[in-house]
Image (cartoon, rainbow, N blue to C red):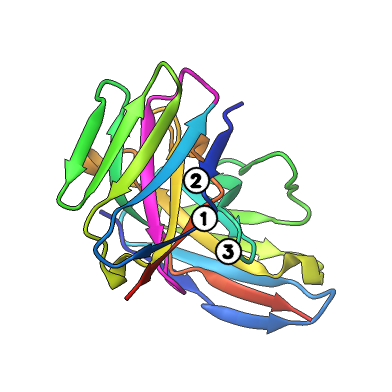
Amino acid sequence: SAVISQKPSRDICQRGTSLTIQCQVDSQVTMMFWYRQQPGQSLTLIATANQGSEATYESGFVIDKFPISRPNLTFSTLTVSNMSPEDSSIYLCSVEGQGVYTGELFFGEGSRLTVL
Amino acid sequence: GENVEQHPSTLSVQEGDSAVIKCTYSDSASNYFPWYKQELGKRPQLIIDIRSNVGEKKDQRIAVTLNKTAKHFSLHITETQPEDSAVYFCAASLYSSASKIIFGSGTRLSIRP
């Protein structure tokens, strides 16, 4: 299994500002995933963060809006840039389990952002 | 690409009764079908999964069935308890391709005392 720590757990932000979310994993992993969960909605993959290369973004998400860093195999950050109220969501960091846990996604506690 | 549809969006059952949530998928290449449970304010957690070489899998009060021909799979919860109240998400992917997992829209299950 994997233990994932995310911070901040929640924040209230002003329109036009940017916020960086941090994700720390207790083991080395190749890929880290960033999801968005809008209120009452499902989990939507924003991007996959690979160590040593640029993140891979899903359709509808761009690097200028959601820049990602992956400085090592246990840490990643997601920045939500130039925020608007539509960015109010829970942002979740996730990794895939290894060994017998292959295929299973482990999630952080999530970062609940409210943009005013 | 893969598309996963989930029904119903909300479900209310009497404590002790059974609950069934159904999902369909579009990509016949998908071979891994996990179910995640998300309690209010908590992170999603895997509760059961099934691979395409198996038609049914059971773990205590929960079971999942898979019909590859029809491309649908279902979650069954028997003898429901208050702690089963949560949002349940089905998903489909290629096994060991977590970056390609597609989630359903979720089912909010409420257990009435």
Q: Secondary structure at mark 1?
A: strand
In the rendered image, residue B43 lying in the magenta stretch gets the answer yes
Name the image quarter holding the C terminus of chain B: bottom left
Q: Is residue A40 visible?
A: yes
Q: Position of residue A49 (x, y in %)?
A: 54, 47
Name the residue carrying label 1. Answer: A71
Give the overall secondary structure of the magenta segment.
loop
Q: Give the alpha-carbon distance from disc 1 to disc 2, as whole Å.
A: 6 Å
* Above or below: residue A100 compared with residue A75: above
Q: Are marks 3 and 2 in contact (CB under 8 Å)?
A: no
Q: Are marks 1 and 2 in contact (CB under 8 Å)?
A: yes
Earlier sequence position, callout 1 versus callout 3: 1
Magenta stretch, residue numbers: B26-44
Nearest the camera: B87 or A50?
B87
Please tell me whether mark 1 or mark 3 is closer to you in this view.
3
* Above or below: residue B25 compared with residue B11: above
- Say left or right for A1 vs A114: left
Picture residue at 45% right of the left edge, 50% below the top: B89
Earlier sequence position, callout 1 versus callout 2: 2
Name the residue carrying label 2. Answer: A51
Q: Position of residue B37 (x, y in %)?
A: 38, 58
Q: Chain of mark 1?
A: A
Picture residue at 47% right of the left edge, 38% below the top: B23
